[in-house]
Image (cartoon, helix red, strand yellow):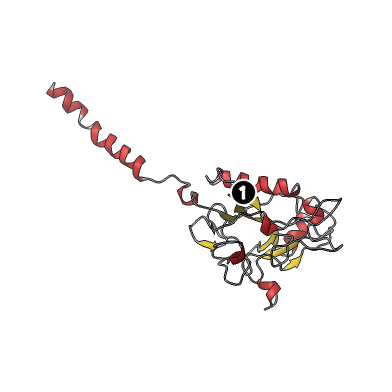
Amino acid sequence: MTRLMKRANPLRPALAVAALALVAAPPALAQSAGITFFVTSSGPGKGADLGGLDGADAQCQKLAQSAGAGTKTWHAYLSTQAADGKPAVNARDRIGKGPWQNAKGVVIAKDVADLHSPANNLTKQTALSEKGEGINGVGDQPNRHDVLTGSQSDGTAFAGPDDRTCKNWTSSTQGAAMVGHLDRRGLRDDEPSKSWNSSHPSRGPEGGCSQADLKSTGGDGLLYCFAAN
């Protein structure tokens, strides 16, 4: 009996350490458990053709799932313009009530009004990807600070004939999409350059909505994603 116990004893510390490690070590995705806001680390790759709002939401959901936050309902911060008998959609009405925090647990806004006020905490340091990583901005190579929004500074859609959503997120050729600067920096020291959601329309030699066009002005087809529930 004693001999059997002696044989078993060397295993006990190893088993105890393994069990303790399983309990003590957080899952690799634990830091993202409370995430309710992120900037996509990548876009679908077709410029501003996101497959409409549904396709954009699916991109947010897919990346959230990869970060361990797929149980939430994710919506892209995008507006659409009135067209083909359908009313406009405001980005601010799609994202829930807040508060929203990034993958590191830093709150970027407590509610919709706060998000669209000068008091929000959306900066290059807090506008992290679903992986908790920073996104390149002004001064980085390549600059990826342009984020697609199609929105005015108050989060509402544009009225009038001018395209600001690349045909409601279905065009990768002709059109224009309003973008914001996630790092709150631009070519000038003015309010549009510092706007996270309404800095300038996209443009470029291929029509304004292609992936190459978005990259030419400092973008990459990225999106803001918010947990709407």
**Residue drawn at 70 percent across, 77 percent down:** 188
Q: Quadrant of residue 17?
A: top left
Observer able to see residue 135 = yes
Quarter placement of the N terminus: top left
Seen in the image, is 177 located left or right of residue 133? right
Of the pair 149 and 129, the residue shown nearer to us: 149
Q: Which residue is mark 1?
A: 74
Tell me, yes or no, if residue 186 can be seen here.
no
- Seen at 36% across and 40% down, the residue is 22
In what element is the residue under mark 1?
Answer: strand
Q: Residue 218 placed where, x, y %?
A: 70, 64
Q: Residue shown at 17%/26% (left/top)?
A: 5
Whole-percent x, y for residue 76 in the image: 66, 53
Left or right, 85 with reference to 48: right
- Please determine whether, in this image, residue 112 is positioned above or below residue 57: below
Closer to us: 52 or 47: 52
Question: How many C-alpha atoms fall within 10 Å of the one at disc 1: few (<14), some, or many (≥20)?
Answer: many
Asked which quadrant contains residue 205, the reply is: bottom right
Going by the picture, which residue comes out furthest to the left?
2
In this view, the residue farthest toward the bottom is: 189
Q: Position of residue 109 (x, y in %)?
A: 56, 63
Amino acid type for the residue under numbered disc 1: Trp
Position of residue 175 measured from the top left corner of the image (x, y, whole percent): 83, 58
Identified at 57% across, 55% down, the residue is: 37
125 or 217: which is nearer to us?
125
Q: Nearer the viewer, residue 162 or 59?
A: 162
Residue at the far top: name it: 1
